[in-house]
Amino acid sequence: ATVEVRLTIPQETDVRAIVAIFRGRNAIPGAAGSVGLTASLGALITFNISGKIKIDADPVRVTPPTDTSNLKVSQFLANTGTEPVVPEGVAAFLDSKGALAAKSNFSSQRLLPGERLEFVAEYPGQLPPGNYRVLCSFQYEGQNLTSSAAITIP
Protein backbone atom coordinates (compact mmCIF):
# COMPACT_ATOMS: atom_id res chain seq x y z
CA ALA A 1 0.00 0.00 0.00
CA THR A 2 1.05 3.59 -0.48
CA VAL A 3 0.61 6.21 2.20
CA GLU A 4 0.96 9.92 1.52
CA VAL A 5 1.99 12.06 4.47
CA ARG A 6 1.77 15.85 4.39
CA LEU A 7 3.08 17.96 7.22
CA THR A 8 2.35 21.61 7.90
CA ILE A 9 5.08 22.97 10.13
CA PRO A 10 4.74 26.34 11.88
CA GLN A 11 7.70 28.65 11.23
CA GLU A 12 8.56 29.16 14.91
CA THR A 13 8.38 25.58 16.18
CA ASP A 14 10.90 23.71 18.32
CA VAL A 15 9.68 20.35 16.99
CA ARG A 16 12.22 18.73 14.66
CA ALA A 17 11.00 15.14 14.42
CA ILE A 18 7.79 13.14 14.29
CA VAL A 19 7.10 9.44 14.41
CA ALA A 20 4.80 7.75 11.92
CA ILE A 21 3.57 4.32 13.01
CA PHE A 22 1.52 1.98 10.85
CA ARG A 23 0.14 -0.69 13.13
CA GLY A 24 -0.68 -4.07 11.68
CA ARG A 25 -4.05 -5.63 12.44
CA ASN A 26 -3.69 -9.02 10.85
CA ALA A 27 -2.23 -11.54 13.26
CA ILE A 28 -0.27 -14.38 11.74
CA PRO A 29 -0.98 -17.39 13.94
CA GLY A 30 1.92 -19.60 14.94
CA ALA A 31 1.93 -23.36 14.82
CA ALA A 32 0.90 -25.21 17.94
CA GLY A 33 3.29 -24.32 20.76
CA SER A 34 4.86 -21.31 18.95
CA VAL A 35 4.30 -17.56 19.07
CA GLY A 36 2.12 -15.72 16.56
CA LEU A 37 3.09 -12.44 14.87
CA THR A 38 1.55 -9.05 14.21
CA ALA A 39 3.72 -6.80 12.05
CA SER A 40 3.90 -3.00 12.30
CA LEU A 41 6.04 -0.42 10.57
CA GLY A 42 7.40 2.84 11.95
CA ALA A 43 9.52 5.72 10.72
CA LEU A 44 11.15 8.73 12.35
CA ILE A 45 10.83 11.78 10.13
CA THR A 46 13.22 14.63 10.89
CA PHE A 47 13.43 18.05 9.29
CA ASN A 48 15.65 21.14 9.37
CA ILE A 49 14.08 24.58 9.46
CA SER A 50 16.52 27.17 10.77
CA GLY A 51 19.87 25.83 9.59
CA LYS A 52 21.34 26.40 13.09
CA ILE A 53 23.52 23.31 13.23
CA LYS A 54 26.19 22.90 15.91
CA ILE A 55 27.97 19.91 17.40
CA ASP A 56 30.24 19.90 20.46
CA ALA A 57 32.73 17.09 21.06
CA ASP A 58 34.15 15.59 24.23
CA PRO A 59 37.83 14.54 24.24
CA VAL A 60 38.80 11.50 22.18
CA ARG A 61 39.15 8.29 24.19
CA VAL A 62 41.30 5.39 23.03
CA THR A 63 41.06 1.88 24.46
CA PRO A 64 44.15 -0.18 23.56
CA PRO A 65 43.71 -3.63 22.02
CA THR A 66 43.88 -6.73 24.16
CA ASP A 67 44.06 -10.43 23.37
CA THR A 68 40.26 -10.50 23.23
CA SER A 69 39.26 -7.02 21.96
CA ASN A 70 40.10 -4.61 19.17
CA LEU A 71 41.58 -1.14 19.52
CA LYS A 72 38.62 1.19 20.13
CA VAL A 73 38.35 4.94 19.58
CA SER A 74 35.31 6.69 21.03
CA GLN A 75 34.06 10.23 21.30
CA PHE A 76 30.85 11.69 22.68
CA LEU A 77 29.18 14.23 20.40
CA ALA A 78 26.40 16.56 21.54
CA ASN A 79 23.97 18.35 19.25
CA THR A 80 23.89 21.86 20.71
CA GLY A 81 22.14 23.36 17.68
CA THR A 82 18.44 23.49 16.91
CA GLU A 83 18.40 21.01 14.00
CA PRO A 84 18.83 17.23 13.67
CA VAL A 85 22.19 16.13 12.27
CA VAL A 86 23.77 12.84 11.14
CA PRO A 87 27.56 13.08 11.53
CA GLU A 88 29.73 10.70 9.52
CA GLY A 89 33.24 10.18 10.83
CA VAL A 90 36.56 8.44 10.52
CA ALA A 91 39.43 7.76 12.92
CA ALA A 92 42.82 8.02 11.21
CA PHE A 93 45.95 6.65 12.87
CA LEU A 94 49.11 8.58 12.00
CA ASP A 95 52.52 7.14 12.84
CA SER A 96 55.36 9.14 14.44
CA LYS A 97 56.34 10.49 10.99
CA GLY A 98 52.80 11.68 10.26
CA ALA A 99 52.07 8.96 7.69
CA LEU A 100 48.66 7.28 7.62
CA ALA A 101 49.05 3.89 9.31
CA ALA A 102 45.39 2.84 9.48
CA LYS A 103 41.85 4.15 9.57
CA SER A 104 38.44 3.04 10.75
CA ASN A 105 34.96 4.49 10.29
CA PHE A 106 32.68 5.58 13.11
CA SER A 107 29.18 4.16 13.09
CA SER A 108 26.83 6.88 11.88
CA GLN A 109 24.04 7.96 14.24
CA ARG A 110 21.38 10.66 14.16
CA LEU A 111 21.52 13.37 16.83
CA LEU A 112 18.37 15.31 17.59
CA PRO A 113 18.74 18.75 19.23
CA GLY A 114 19.92 18.27 22.83
CA GLU A 115 21.02 14.66 22.27
CA ARG A 116 24.49 13.42 23.27
CA LEU A 117 25.73 10.05 22.00
CA GLU A 118 28.96 8.08 21.95
CA PHE A 119 30.42 7.44 18.50
CA VAL A 120 32.70 4.39 18.32
CA ALA A 121 35.23 3.14 15.76
CA GLU A 122 37.04 -0.18 16.17
CA TYR A 123 40.23 -1.07 14.35
CA PRO A 124 40.35 -4.85 13.79
CA GLY A 125 43.99 -4.97 12.67
CA GLN A 126 47.17 -4.73 14.69
CA LEU A 127 49.28 -1.60 14.63
CA PRO A 128 53.03 -2.10 15.00
CA PRO A 129 54.46 -0.92 18.34
CA GLY A 130 55.08 2.81 18.42
CA ASN A 131 53.61 6.26 19.03
CA TYR A 132 50.56 7.34 17.07
CA ARG A 133 48.23 10.31 16.80
CA VAL A 134 44.55 9.49 16.29
CA LEU A 135 42.64 12.10 14.28
CA CYS A 136 38.86 11.87 14.61
CA SER A 137 37.09 13.80 11.89
CA PHE A 138 33.31 14.14 11.54
CA GLN A 139 31.49 15.69 8.57
CA TYR A 140 27.95 17.02 8.86
CA GLU A 141 25.90 19.46 6.80
CA GLY A 142 28.98 20.83 4.98
CA GLN A 143 30.94 21.32 8.21
CA ASN A 144 33.87 19.44 9.76
CA LEU A 145 34.81 18.75 13.36
CA THR A 146 38.27 17.29 14.06
CA SER A 147 39.85 16.20 17.36
CA SER A 148 42.96 14.21 18.17
CA ALA A 149 44.66 12.13 20.85
CA ALA A 150 48.08 10.55 21.27
CA ILE A 151 48.43 6.81 21.88
CA THR A 152 51.31 4.38 22.34
CA ILE A 153 51.13 0.79 21.20
CA PRO A 154 53.59 -1.27 23.31
Image: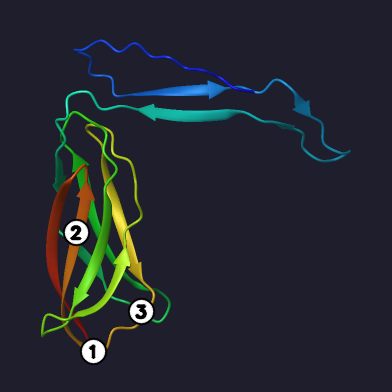
Q: Which amino acid type is shown beneath numbered disc 2?
A: Ser
In what element is the residue under mark 3? loop
Whether residue 80 is situated above or below residue 133 in the rendered picture: above
Pointer 2: what residue?
A: 137
Pinpoint residue 121: horizontal percent, then vertical percent: 32, 63
Task: Give the Cα separation between the discs numbered 3 and 2.
Answer: 25 Å
* Residue drawn where x is 13% and y is 57% of the image: 146
* Residue drawn where x is 24% and y is 65% of the image: 91
Specify whether residue 58 is in view: no
Pointer 3: what residue?
A: 66
Q: Nearer the viewer, residue 92 or 8?
A: 8
Pinpoint residue 152: horizontal percent, then vertical percent: 18, 81
What crowding class fits label 1: few (fewer than 14 Cα within 10 Å), some (14-19), or many (20 or more)?
Answer: few
Q: Looking at the rendered structure, which numbered label has been put on residue 129?
A: 1
Q: Going by the image, does 143 lie left or right of 107?
A: left
Q: Which amino acid type is shown beneath numbered disc 3?
A: Thr
Q: Earlier in the sequence, mark 2 or mark 1?
A: 1
Observer-side mark, 3 or 1, equals 1
Whether residue 89 is situated above or below residue 12 in the rendered picture: below
Q: Going by the image, does 118 lie left or right of 143?
A: right
Q: Earlier in the sequence, mark 3 or mark 2?
A: 3
Specify whether residue 23 is in view: yes
Q: Which amino acid type is shown beneath numbered disc 1?
A: Pro
Q: Earlier in the sequence, mark 3 or mark 1?
A: 3
What crowding class fits label 3: few (fewer than 14 Cα within 10 Å), some (14-19), or many (20 or more)?
Answer: few
Quarter residue 147 falls in: bottom left
Quadrant including the C terminus: bottom left
Quadrant including the N terminus: top right
